[in-house]
Image (cartoon, rainbow, N blue to C red):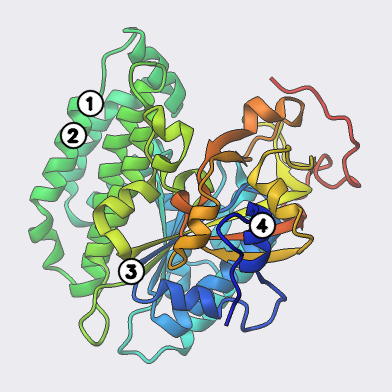
Amino acid sequence: METKPDAHASPLSWVMAAARPLTGSIEDYDVLLERIGAARFVLIGEASHGTHEFYEERARITQRLIAEKGFSAVAVEADWPDAYRVNRYLRGQGEDKSGEQALAGFKRFPTWMWRNTEVVRFIEWLRRYNESLPSRLPPVGFYGLDLYSLFTSISEVLRYLDKVDPQAARQARARYACFDHFGRSSERYGYSTSYGLSASCQDAVIAQMHELNARAAEYVKRDGRAASDELFYAQQNARLVTNAEQYYRTMFDRRVSSWNLRDRHMMETLDALARHLPRTEDGMPARIVVWEHNSHVGDARATDVGLAGELTVGQLARESYGDQAFLVGMTTYQGSVTAASDWDAPAERKRVLPALPGSHETLFHQTGIGRFMLAFKGDRDLAQALSRRRLERAIGVIYRPETERSSHYFYACLPQQFDCVLHFDQTRAVEPLEWGDIWNLDEAPETFPAGL
């Protein structure tokens, strides 16, 4: 039996006593799976969008959840149409012959976020797993939760209607023609409508979504489950167009939180997916793994950005599903990361500076344990010992080390933000499938190029 520190012990003593080292063995995540228990939704975060260890360990956990606990879908921070191409590959559908080909739909910045070697390995594992399943069991799926694919989703709605209802397709084209003079630029549409330079397409996209939903029963009669899946795919694209239109229209309006619109959309998509997926053989609802950044997976109410009014998928999942949602975060102290210096800039391999004093990451570094897990759920004493808010680092697709504190840190109470945290003290950059000259350099120097 573990010996706990006394009530007056330092936070470091509590972390060292509770830390469960991660050695790379098959047993590493036994305790995590026990704590997850019967939860339907396991949300696994990452402290950056470009760290090898985050992708690798997230895949290891997910493989066990699928193989041992019957999880049947992976929902990721990616666009719905691009991820659905991967979903078709996993089912042996479509024309793609490999996982790398199936990921070719991810053409929008940041391509390395999904077009990297770790994701390819995971996709190929899922394909092999599905091929091994008895025919009576549904395959494991791969789905995107995000809303950036405004024009791609319009094309996918039209492609579906061309196939099932050409007359409805003509009407949909007339409605979506509202976007034609923006040259497939979502940002141009948002700017023009925000400043009154162009009329909004809001009414047109809402009308199209409602009409598609109203005719759903008619369309789904055609080919059973296959027709149901294709209709569901089209319906989510139509809803995405509606939410993306609002997102881009309000992203220049400081009075409206585009962050909240985005996270609400991702939660709506997760809810819709949970309702759509078939139940298990014993009649239980489908179980889903979610891959997103810590800043989406964590509960916003435990952070200063939450106090400022931002919400997250993790918060919404807890509010909707209670203990059926289990939140996992990941942290690192230093290393390298694949990130850009600016939006739409090339991927670079950048050195991650040592974490700032007073941060959770520095506290974890002081243990001297290279990799470990802290399980807060089920351990009130540990949660209480670490209840003080500390700095937490978040690196997205852009990393600006020259403005590290203001660009990448916020305050958070970790035991309230997550049910469990995995710490990897030294990490390295994830490998993009397309190696640019900037990424494929030796380790970056200690000085960095100027950012914004």
Q: Give how far apart the Cα atoms at labels 4 and 1 are.
A: 36 Å
Left or right: 232 in relation to 442:
left
Q: Give how far apart the Cα atoms at labels 3 and 2 are.
A: 31 Å
Q: Which residue is mark 3?
A: 40
Q: Which mark is residue 409?
A: none
User: Which quadrant of the rendered structure holds the C terminus?
Assistant: top right
Q: Which residue is mark 2?
A: 206
Q: Which residue is mark 4?
A: 116
Looking at numbered disc 1 in the image, what kind of residue is underneath it?
Gln
Q: Quadrant of residue 385?
A: bottom right
For discs 3 and 2, the disc positioned in front in the rendered view: 3
Depth check: give the residue in front, 321 or 341: 321
Asked whether residue 120 appears in the rendered view, the answer is no
User: Which quadrant of the rendered structure holds the N terminus?
Assistant: bottom right
Q: Which residue is mark 1?
A: 202
Looking at numbered disc 3 in the image, what kind of residue is underneath it?
Arg
